[in-house]
Structure formats: C-alpha cells, structure tokens
Image: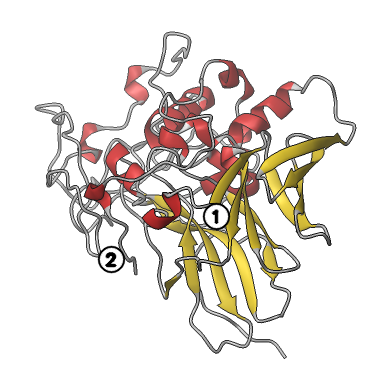
Amino acid sequence: MTLALEIEGDNLRQVAIDPDGRYGYVASMKNRGFATTRNNIDQGWVVGQRLTRVTLDGSESYATLSLDTRGQAAADAHGAAISPDGRILAVSCGGTHEVMLFRTGPRKLPWRFEGSRDLIPVELLNNDGRYRRVATGGRPTELAFAPDGKTLYAANYLGDSVQVIDAEEATLARTIALGGPSEPSLARRGEALFHDATKSFNQWYSCNTCHSDGHTNGLDFDTLNDGRQDLTSLHLRSRKKVPTLRRVALTRPWTWHGWQTSLEDSVIESFTKSMQGPPRTPAMSRRSSPSSRPSTSRATPTARPTEVSRPPRSGASPCSARPRPPATPATAAPSSPTARSISRASKSPTTPIAAIIPPHSGASTTRTPTSTTAAARPSRTP
C-alpha cells in the first residue's frame, strides 16, 4: 500500500524510519519567500532548515524542528538517521559542514505541529544535552547508526571519506579516507565553493541551496540581481525562478534580463548580493561594462516600508527593508509590467573566485549553540 503524507518543505533528502516503525523523519529546507536582505536572512524569513517527522500510518499531522540559530545558521540539511534505541536523532548539514545531534529523552523535543518556527526553539539552547553540533568539514551527506546506538557514520562527499562520530559524546572520532587525491583539482575546489554556506551572511545558504545538485530546485526567490527587490508586504512582484546551471558556461548572456555578460561577475553578484556575503574587493575584477547593468526603469521602487523586528505570522507579511539608494534621476521610467519584469543571478561554481571570497566574518567556525534574542521569538509559519 502506498500512502502520500503531506508536509511543508523543499529539497527533501534522506528519510529515516524509527525502530518501532511508527515515525519517519526527513531533512529538508523551507522557502519563506521574503527578499534577501540581511535582516530577513537572519530572522529565518528567506530560507530555513527543518527536520520533519511524520506518522507512517498518517494518523497524526506532520511536525517539525527548525535547525537554525540566529548568527550561526544551518545550511543544506541532507542526511537523517535515528539510533536503534530511538534515543538520538542525527541530521547532517552539508552547507555548514556539520552533523547535528538531538536527544529524544528523557525531556521531549519541542516539535511544532502542522507548521514550523523560523528559528530553533529557544529551550534547546540551554545546553541540557538535547541539541549538539559536531563539526566535520567537507560536505557530510547520508548518515547511518551502528547497532551499538552510539556510533554514527557520515558519508562526506567533498572529503572523499567516511567519518565516525561518537553520538554520545558529540565528537568526531575518526575519518576513514577513501583514496581521494592529495590535492583537489580546480574543478573540485570550485565544487567546494559551490556547497559552502559560510560564504553567505551568517552561513544561511549556499549556491547548492537553490541550484540543487548544480541544477535548480524549481522555486522562486527575491534576489537583487535584477536591481530591485519587493520590500512591500506582498513580497511577490520581484521573485525570480531559479535557473538551471547545467551547461551554464555555454548560455551567455546571463540573468533573466540578459544584462550580465561576464559569468565571473555574475557569480560575484550572487555571493555579494543574493547571499549577502563579503563585499566586493579589488581582487574581484569587474570585466563587464557599465552599460551592461540593468536599466534603472527595472528598479523603480514603489514602496519603502520600514524595517521590522518581529517575525511575520501565518504568512502575514512584514518584510524588512534597508533604505535603498534612489533610482537614477531623469532616466527612470514609470512603473509598468515591463518595469516589474524579473531576472536572477546565476550561481556558478567558478573556481578562480574561491581564492578571493573568504568565509563571511559573521559565520562562526565553532559549533556551540548560541542563544536568540527576545526581539525575534520563533513564530509559526503557514
């Protein structure tokens, strides 16, 4: 018998079944849909990572655990596993190079039914052992527990290795090399950059988050590559569907308007604007001409709401907005359907950029839980 179980989430990855066969768990992403401003990103209003639980007989609604903390998010949740005794849940996050561990008892985990919070539940940040993070490096993907219930194996795609984690102590016990090259090729270095969420603001997402497996996840996002974002309460008028990156080097010019004539510049635009990573430096040479920038008529704002400090509820709308520079005078055209047309940046793993885009200074390399502030209490989303 086949049973379809409805959940909310995108980029669904590994599924794990608990020992008694009652629950299934899946790691996924949630697209919140708001513009990629820094405030929106760190509130969890652009994307967020989730662990979702379902009853396999469909007798209960789905429930979620949000995985992100403000200032040190989780990115690209992929693997899910549960120990044979059901005491420990594990989730791998390839974009932030780590494995998260959750104890299911004696205190129960704070699942949110029929929805999800924007940030991890505050009660899990009290260092009571229910939530721990283990740094692995590389890109951990699929997970599996050993029969002893405390040894966890992680396949590390970019590390060309299998990693052994002590799930009781939350430590990386050892790494088993699988014979990869001693020095990564240029293509491999570009692939590592493509999957690295620490290049984004507070490590919320990587190129792979939207361009899944170098293709597309088929979703819409409100990036700034076309020169505008919709900062009104509707947040619908400037969303762009993620384009595929397959054979992208052969499909110039780039972005939906076709204004970008340099693939390298297009990648830098994605890192510095869509991902809100480190600003452009002199090393990031710009080869495209000023005339290739999008017309100011495509970026004419219609409203500039003020920044908000509380998350939206049930799809309600306040999107934060940092003041933007006014449109260029004299040449700006009136708002029209053409002026509201959309485009997006290509996030190609161009290797030479790997050496000139460092991890964002806001991303911590430690894996200790951080607390959230009272100004952004987790909220229920639609």
Q: Nearer the viewer, residue 27 or 293?
A: 27
Q: Which is closer to the viewer, label 1 or label 2? A: 2
**Residue 245 can be seen in this image:** no
Name which of mark 1 and mark 2 comes first in the sequence: 1
Residue indicated by mark 1: 217
Q: Nearer the viewer, residue 98 or 262?
A: 98
Q: Secondary structure at mark 2?
A: loop
Q: Nearer the viewer, residue 286 or 49?
A: 49
Image coordinates for residue 151, horizontal then vertical, percent: 78, 52
Q: CA distance from mark 1 to mark 2?
A: 21 Å
Total count of labels: 2
The image quadrant where one finds the C terminus is bottom left
37 left or right of 241?
left
Residue indicated by mark 2: 315
Q: Based on the displayed image, in which of its 4 quarters is residue 195 positioned?
A: top right
Q: The disc labelled 2 sits on which kind of residue?
A: Gly
